[in-house]
Amino acid sequence: MPVYFPREIIHAANGLAIGILGGGDKKLIIKGDAYYQSYICHMPRSIIELALDKHFEGFDGFIFPSICDVIRNLSGMFQLMEIGKFVKYLDFPQNFLPHIGGTFYRHELQTVLDQVYKLNGVEVTAQKLNHSIGLFNLNRQLICKLYDIRQEFPWRLTAADVYHIVRAGYVIPVEEHNEILEEVIRHMQKEFGDPLDKIRVLVIGAFCEQPPAGLIKTIELAGCYIVEDDFLLGARWIQGDIDTAGSDPLGAITQAYLDMSTFSSSVYDVGNPKEARLLQLIRQRKIDGVIFAAPSFCDPALLDHPILQKECNDKGIRFVSFLYSENTGQFKVIKEQVGTFSDSIKLWD
Ligand code: SF4
């Protein structure tokens, strides 16, 4: 489940890690609403609905990376209902010192590997894990390249297309996804299409419950190119290559989390303020304006937004904000709001 999980360790154990990101706008929620109070986000209800409707029958185990209390409770529900052969709430360190947070995180990953070993008896050697890390390093490089090309030529592929291409990697083997990404990149390197008179925006706040594809399309139809976002953030979480040459690849994965994680509302990243990192991203991607788009009732995102918005205000960066849920179906108001935002930047900046 969102946001980030080191899929390398499951790959090295001959497993396939599938990203479960909610029911989107396709799944009607009936039973799921009975499991949660009304004032929380939508995604956990749709996940429980999918589970109760037996969509997860083929899965062996479920890993709930720590994001917020809602996901912690969801893991408890899976445990109580005995869904899957194991359920693991994976606590990420909020302390980034190697001998404290690092030791803790490594132990958590080893617990996952032990659970998988009990199921399939596959031993994860250093050689196998290094190989898997190499494949996911390539996957991250290719996704970064996709974003880099789009930063320069956003008219060559829509943000919704990029979203679907990256999201495919959550449900297919990484080898296959790498081939698709290479093909898309070859296609995007060709000269085609003409730039439109749109502003360049960064969308932030959508790191966990995903916006419907219609909302991503709406933002671009309202006069924006989304050149940076935090959709499907887990696929780009580690910002660089994890070492594949050493004899302790689990240590390398742990160290990468401590040193190379991106910023997100799900991480207490003391000493490395998110507002400064947001600003850096705004400069790097030559952003005209920021769109704060958070799922309704998403505490982590909504607690961060005032801090990030203050930074934007202080630095004279224009922004607009709205809430969504994964099954939002009416985009007219958002289109008008974003369209006005885009026009105001084009007319007065
Ligand atoms: S969308 Fe926000 S509140 Fe909901 S599970 Fe994700 S982080 Fe938690």
Image (cartoon, helix red, strand yellow):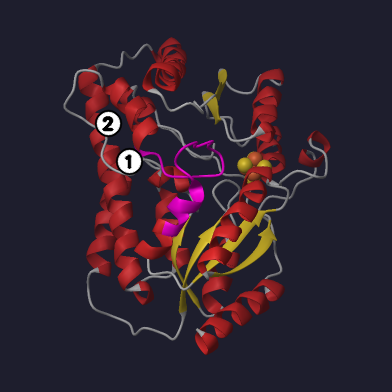
- Residue 140 x %, y %: 31, 46
Q: Does the magenta stretch include residue 312?
A: no
Q: Nearer the viewer, residue 160 or 207?
A: 207
Q: How far apart are labels 1 and 2 at the CA level?
A: 9 Å
Q: In which quarter of the image is residue 194?
A: bottom left
- Identify the amino acid type marked 1: Val
User: Which residue is drawn at the image coordinates 64% and 33% (left, top)?
Assistant: 71
Above or below residue 310? Residue 335 is below
The circle drawn on residue 132 is 2
User: Which residue is drawn at the image coordinates 20% and 21% (left, top)?
Assistant: 127
Secondary-structure class at tag 1: helix
- Identify the amino acid type marked 2: Ser
- Residue 84 x %, y %: 58, 22
Image marks 1 and 2: residues in contact by CB distance under 8 Å: yes
Q: Name the residue under label 1.
A: 174
Secondary-structure class at tag 2: helix
Above or below residue 82? Residue 270 is below
